Image (tube, rainbow, N blue to C red):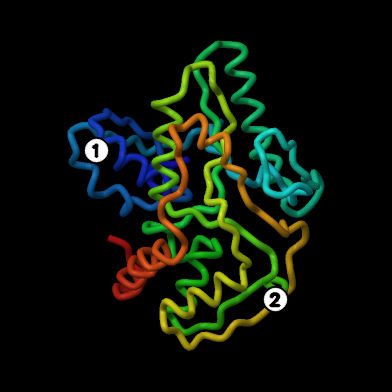
Amino acid sequence: MQPSDTIGSHLCERLLAEGNDIICIDNYFTGHKSNIRHLLSHPNFEIIRHDIVYPCMAEIEEIYGDPLIHPQREDYWGHVNPLGIRSCYDEGKRCAESLFMSYYREHGIPVKIIRIFNTYGPKMDINDGRVVSNFIVQALRGDNITIYGDGGQSRSFQYIDDLIEGMVRMMDDTPDDFTGPVNIGNPNEFTIAELAREVISLTGSKSKIVHLPLPADDPQQRQPDISLARNMLGGWEPRIQLRDGLLKTIAYFEEVLSRGGIRR
């Protein structure tokens, strides 16, 4: 991940608050400097603007593809179309885990792999194309809310603070020989249509829901089994549920939109 993107910036804040020194490399390709501007004067924070040709990536639940088991456990190898329209994205995540494990076996350097399920919260970009930010921005602008397919496909939405807590516990509280992978996500499952209706309700928007064709290979269900996270990460589980997390995220986007979409 990049320190200037949504997850990376929250993680930097948490690690700095715990007294860690942080040196980051970022090309700002998927992030925004405004997310870390307040950290630039911190004595323990440094950032180098650079493009890493061979990046390492934090994994996300795309490794499971369009899963045939539900919920998804870490020992499930996934169901991915290697030639489909989503193949580069899905297979890229799977390849990254393979490379991490090969590096671990070759060099014995501690490696930690987490599988991040849908995460949302402040510092998301208004144009990042993710479903939570899309729905909130469309609702606040009074635009139609676009659902692909009938909206019956399900996802599990995790607030950013819960993810950061899980990441820190994975780094700090597990033995060096425990590599994971570990699912980090909220096991509460909602359909996309339910999410759209909740966003409309919380924003008081007059937006209408419209349906567009479902993209090829779009997963029908996503729900993490977090038993391993509970066992290995000191009883970790999400604390912030969807309604409360959406209210915090809506407040953030209201502020951004009040400035014409400009992030400070």
Residue 87 placement, left or right of 1? right
Residue 1 placement, left or right of 213? left
Quarter the C terminus occupies: bottom left
**Front-lying residue, 150 or 26:** 150
Relative to residue 212, is residue 47 depicted above or below?
above
What residue do we see at 62% from left, 32% from top?
96
What residue do we see at 50% from left, 18% from top?
110
Residue 227 placement, left or right of 120? right
Residue 51 in picture, x, y percent from top left: 46, 37
Amino acid type indicated by mark 2: Leu
Q: Secondary structure at mark 2?
A: strand
Q: Quadrant of residue 152?
A: bottom right
Residue 186 placement, left or right of 164? right
Amino acid type indicated by mark 1: Ala
**Front-lying residue, 1 or 11:** 11
Task: Give the residue at the far bottom of this rendering.
Answer: 206
Relative to residue 205, is residue 220 depicted above or below?
above
Relative to residue 176, is residue 202 depicted above or below?
below
Relative to residue 14, is residue 121 depicted above or below?
below
Please tell me which of labels 2 and 1 falls first in the chain. 1
What residue do we see at 41% from left, 61% from top?
245
Q: What residue is disc 1 on?
A: 17
Q: What residue is disc 2 on?
A: 212
